Image (tube, rainbow, N blue to C red):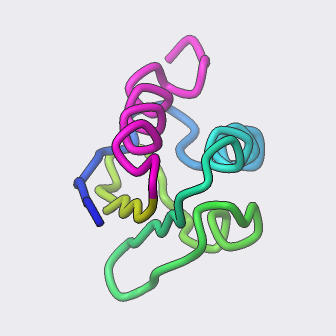
Amino acid sequence: MIRKELEIINKLGLHARAAAKLVKCADSFASEIRVTRGEQSVNGKSIMGLMMLAASQGTRIIVETDGTDEQEALAAIEQLIGERFGEPE
């Protein structure tokens, strides 16, 4: 299992479209993926769970991946967040 703290940097935060992109990315890996904000931890493959985190711009989350492709999964999620989910700002 590996984990990394990441910051949500896009202007709108982890809204529905961004959460859907994160789920699509997570679903492409066999590893289990958990996303945590504060005391709340959710399945990274659940759009409803991710939206319940209410992660706005500047929020720090912890992404944990566990499985055969955990490093690739974490790298892909980190890249997606770093690219602001494909949003301009």
Measuring 49% from the left and 17% from the top, which residue is drawn there? Answer: 89
Residue 16 position (above or below residue 72):
below
Residue at image x 51%, y 63%?
33
Q: Is residue 69 magenta?
A: yes
| Residue toward you, 34 or 19 | 34
Q: Which image quarter: residue 54?
A: bottom right
The reply, left or right, for residue 39 in relation to residue 28 is left
Task: Point out residue 87 in the picture as x, y percentages from the top left corner.
Answer: 60, 18
Query: Viewed as shown, does residue 71 lie left or right of 19?
Result: left
In this rendering, the count of numbered labels is 0
Q: Is residue 80 above or below residue 27?
A: above
Say which quadrant the N terminus sits in: bottom left
Say whether residue 3 is left or right of residue 24. left
Q: Residue furthest bottom?
A: 39
Identity of the residue furthest to the top in this view? 88
Q: Which secondary structure dominates the residues rendered in magenta?
A: helix
Where 76 sits versus 8, above or below? above
Residue beneath the point at 37% across and 59% down: 63
- Residue drawn where x is 72% and y is 66% of the image: 46
The answer to whether 35 is drawn above or below residue 4 in the figure is below
Q: Pinpoint residue 82: horizontal percent, then vertical percent.
A: 38, 26
Magenta-drawn stretch contains 39: no
What residue range appears in magenta? 68-89
* Residue 47 placement (x, y as % from top left): 75, 61
Pinpoint residue 3: horizontal percent, then vertical percent. Answer: 26, 60
Q: Along the horizontal axis of the image, is 5 left or right of 9?
A: left
Q: Residue furthest front?
A: 68
